[in-house]
Structures are given as structure tokens and as C-alpha cells.
Amino acid sequence: MGICMEQYVITISRQFGSMGRSIAKELSENLGIEFLDRDIVEATAKRMGLPVSVISDEEESMKSTFFRRQYPLGMGMSSLKDEIFYTQKNIIRDFAAKGSCIIVGRCADYALASNPDCLSIFVHADMDDRIKRVSKRDTGMTISCADDAAAAGEALIRMGAKAVLIKGGHMESSIVVTDCLCQAGQAPKFLPQPKVETNNNHGTGCTLSAAIATGLGHGLPLQVAVTRAQEFLNLALRKSYAPGKGCGPVNHAARR
């Protein structure tokens, strides 16, 4: 990489499970510059006089990069969230002014958008690879079949989750996709749907989770909400489209 400026900053945003943090860490070692991630949380906590755990918890509830970029003044969030956002933005700029560094996440690309010596990188990876990587990291298991999914789901339940839905789209099958729903105190439930062969599958996870949340908001039992969400996603995949090049989106306007 041809970085020749005397002082520079690299910001790395990433998809969940894409190894963006590991890439950033290795890059910082190769370039011999500072790596910043949790350091920003700790600096924020110190500057605001709050426990690190409070900052971490608040961060988890406002992680959407899109909304933080679109609504930098807040989205009706608590004043604490707004204060954390602005404090972190100032801390990121302070770190950038001190010397060359790599900053992971926390909208550093937005905070340093006007910095001419900032290179912003977005790390992404294939969905199947991300699912396998995160599953192995969190449960120590590799999911390749429905039984693996059930075992991983039950492992996550033992860690404290009340319910876990493991998608089966990454498993090898030419006929069906079997999702696995695990709930505390209940046997795993396997929920099959016909497999849809399409390259236009962008947004499957977001669509499924949003449809489940909608069903729950209407008072449906969890399993019913999941099943109806599966049916909607299956239809949206069958009627997916390609507006341009590459992987197109599922069709949220799909109707039977």
C-alpha cells in the first residue's frame, strides 16, 4: 500500500464476522503504527467520568453506522448517547492529531471525513464465511448440518440467551433451507423452507429479523412469528431482482 505521507490515519469499518478487527491489528503491526479500538471506549469513559461498562452498553444500543451518519445530532436518543457520540468523535480527532494510527469502527470515517490524510476502508466478506467464523468463535463449533445448528443454539442458550434462531441458508442442500429455533427450556425446533436459487439475496438476515420483530409486535408467539417471517423471506427471495450489477436485494414489496 503506497502511503507516503508523514502522518496519516486509517479507519476500518467492517461487516460483523468479516475479520476487520484482526486485519486492522495485523496492518498496524506491519506499518508500525498505533492500533485503536477499546482505547477509545476507555478514553471516553475517563473524559466523561463514567465506568467503561456504561459506555460499552450505550455503544451496543446505537451501533448503526447508517443512522449515526444520517442523524449526527441524534435520533431522539438519550442525551447520554448524544454526549458519548460527540465525546468519541472529539477523542478520535485528538488521536488522529497526535500521530499515525489505525482506528477500528466507531464512525471514525465520519469523524475524520474532512481529514485529507485519512484513508477509510470497509472490510466485507461472504455471508457463509462470516456465519461459520462467528459460530466457531462464539460456540467453538462449526455448523455444517441441522444437528450442528441445534448444538450451537443450545450452547448459546446456556450462555444466557432466551432464544436463538440459526439460519440454515449456508448449509449444503439443494432442496430445503432448515432454520433452527432454540428456546430456553424447550427442545430445538427445525423449521424447513424450500430453497430458492438466486444470486439476488442481499438483505436476507435483516429482512428475516425485521419480519420476526414485526410479528412479535403484533403479539404472535415466537415460533409463529419466525415461521411467518420465513414464509415472507422465501417469497421475497423468489421475487428478488437485480437493479444493476452484482448481488441484488430481496423484494420487500413481494406479494403472493
Image (cartoon, grey):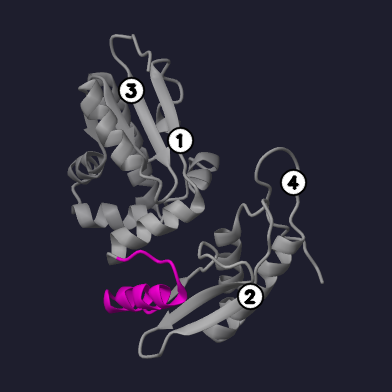
Q: Quadrant of the C terminus?
A: bottom right
Q: Is residue 191 above or below residue 196?
A: below
Q: CA distance from mark 4 to mark 2?
A: 23 Å
Q: CA distance from mark 1 to mark 3?
A: 14 Å
Q: Secondary structure at mark 3?
A: strand
Residue type at mark 3 is: Val
* Residue 193 - label: 2
Q: Secondary structure at mark 4?
A: loop
Q: Is residue 107 above or below residue 126?
A: above
Q: Quadrant of the N terminus?
A: top left
Q: Answer whether labels 2 and 3 touch (C-beta < 8 Å).
A: no
Image side of residue 69 versus residue 147, left or right: right
Say which of marks 1 and 3 sits in front: 1
Question: From which residue to which does the magenta span run?
Answer: 141-163
* Residue 242 - label: 4
Say which of marks 2 and 3 sits in front: 2
Q: CA distance from mark 1 to mark 4?
A: 23 Å
Whichever of labels 2 and 1 marks the residue nearer the N terminus, that label is 1
Say which of marks 3 and 4 sits in front: 4
Q: What residue would you read off at disc 1?
A: 122
Q: Answer whether labels 4 and 2 touch (C-beta < 8 Å).
A: no
